[in-house]
Image: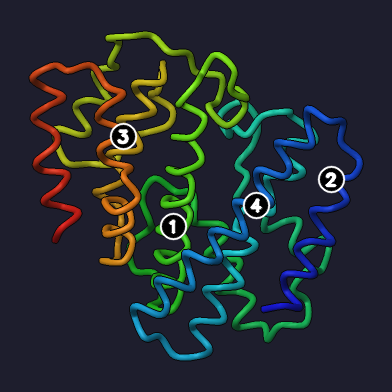
Amino acid sequence: MNNFKIIFTDFSTTYIQNADENERQNYLLKYDHSLRVLENCQGICTSLNLNKNLTSTANIAALFHDTGRFPQYLKYKTFKDANSCNHAILGVKYILRKKLLANLPKSQLRTILGSVALHNRNKLPENLPEHLKITTKIVRDSDKIDIMGILLSHMKNVATSNSVPLMDLKEIPEKLTESILLSLEECKQASYQEMQCLNDFRMLLLSWAYDLNFKWSKKQMINRGFVETLFYGLPKTPRVEKLYLPIMNQLKS
């Protein structure tokens, strides 16, 4: 993977070096995130005992999954796709345009590009080829686990935190958007587009429990303290409290 890390670093460094101090931290956020997503991916692949080729494909896809975040932020100054563009599709375009993975076999490249394109979908299409399905699910789980840690660190002190990772959402105590809450009550993944405040973001992160695919990922969500921290930040209402047990049962399944 060292060669691919060099390629990814060379690509992202152009954006990091040309940014002012305030913007540089947002590029570095995505650079560091990508490396940690790769680490998560390696953990999942090891737990599944995947063959060497599939492991390599998943690892490369994980490392390059957020390639589009760099040109996205350069143009729009946001990571919110709804206010800019689909960063996953943009990533595919830049991987091809910059020939970042041009030396890979075409079949492997197609799988990687597919995983990059699909990693941010709310729901995966039916009837994906098996190798594309598994690599995409690995990338999605790896991504979600790291995003939770990033966002929770920013939610600790919203007043002084960088607002870009939190998509400029505000802390509105006691506010819960009904559609987000309903998604959790129905044991479904909530939608970014419906979020109106940081409590909604907390609930959305909890809803990811219903979209994680592997035991390794589910275990990380518990062991890293994400569930407890997210519930701690939410209003202590009967409806919210009833969400805890189904989520824990899902993560222990």
Question: Quarter of the image containing the C terminus?
Answer: bottom left
Asked whether the residues under the numbered discs 3 and 4 touch, taking CB atoms below 8 Å apart as contact, a structural biologist would say no
Nearest to the eye among marks 3 and 2: give it.
3
Query: Which corner quadrant of the image does residue 109 belong to?
Result: bottom right
Label 3 with label 2: CB-CB less than 8 Å? no
Q: CA distance from mark 4 to mark 1?
A: 17 Å
Q: CA distance from mark 3 to mark 2?
A: 33 Å
The foreground one among 144 and 104 is 144
Q: Which residue is mark 2?
A: 15
Residue type (three-letter) at the residue carrying disc 1: Arg
Could you tell me which secondary element the residue under label 1 belongs to? helix
User: Which residue matches tag 4?
Assistant: 32
Mark 4 vs mark 1: give the one in front.
4
Could you say whether the residue bearing mark 4 is in a helix, strand or loop?
A: helix
Q: Is residue 131 left or right of residue 86?
A: left
What residue appears at the point 42 percent right and 77 percent down from the top-left corner? 45
Mark 3 or mark 4: name the one nearer the start of the chain.
4
Circle 3 is placed at which residue position? 229
**The residue under label 2 is which amino acid type?**
Tyr
First along the sequence among labels 1 and 3: 1
Image position, residue 201 (x, y; %) = 39, 28
Q: Residue 74's quadrant in the figure?
A: top right
C-alpha gap between disc 3 and disc 4: 22 Å
Residue identified by numbered label 1: 140
Work out whether 108 lies above or below 170: below
Using the image, determine if residue 200 lies above or below residue 18: above
Q: What's the mark number on residue 47?
A: none
